[in-house]
Amino acid sequence: MNTPTLPAPSAREFAWAWSAYTLAAVGLFMFWTWIVGLLIAHFRRNESAEPLFAAHYRWQIRTFWFSMLWYTLAMALIVASAWPVLREVLRQAPAADAGALSLSLDWTAIFTTATGALIGGASMIGIWVWSAYRLVRGMIALADARAVP
């Protein structure tokens, strides 16, 4: 029985996909390169006639945007948890002399800020690990010429 063979993916499209993955991976350390990789993925997603590469570009785009969503929420948690301390500083600043600022905080404000910063910081590390995992998983699939889910 003859099974149809699929045409080999184009080397040019592999180069574009690898470029986008490499820029995204470097973007884990220098954010601007991830933006360039995202732009490549966005432009090439509709240009590629091969579903293998369209799946990889979609994977990269979704990885970026979900990472940014979760990073934004983690940063909002850090900022929101810092609000009790900030509120006390702003409330006590007008009453202080220009030369001496005496700040008195209650322990609840300090623990709220520290807890929020700890949870937000741990979340950011987790998001970074998740992003790195998705990029490595995509690179491995691309190296094997397999589509990602």
Image (tube, rainbow, N blue to C red):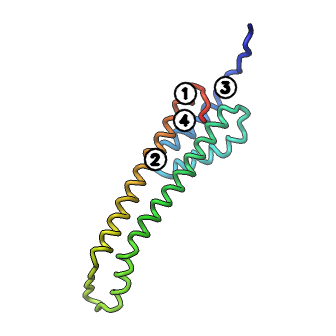
Q: How far apart are marks 1 and 3 (CA)?
A: 12 Å
Alpha-carbon span between mark 3 and mark 2 = 28 Å
Is residue 80 found left or right of 62 in the rendered image? left
- Residue labelled with disc 2: 28
Mark pair 4, 1: CA separation: 9 Å
Q: Residue at position x 53%, y 33% from top?
A: 139
The residue wearing badge 1 is: 143
- Which residue in the protein does label 4 denote? 138
**Viewer-nearest of discs 4 and 2:** 4
Please indicate whether residue 111 sits to the left or right of residue 11 in the image: left
The amino acid type, in three-letter code, at marker 4 is Gly
Q: What residue type is labelled 2?
A: Leu
C-alpha distance separating marks 4 and 3: 16 Å
Badge 3, how many Cα within 10 Å: few under 14, some, many 20+? few
Q: Mark 3 points at which residue?
A: 9
The three-letter amino acid code for the residue at tag 3 is: Pro
Q: Which structural element holds mark 4? A: helix
Which of the marked residues, 4 or 2, is nearer the chain's N terminus?
Answer: 2
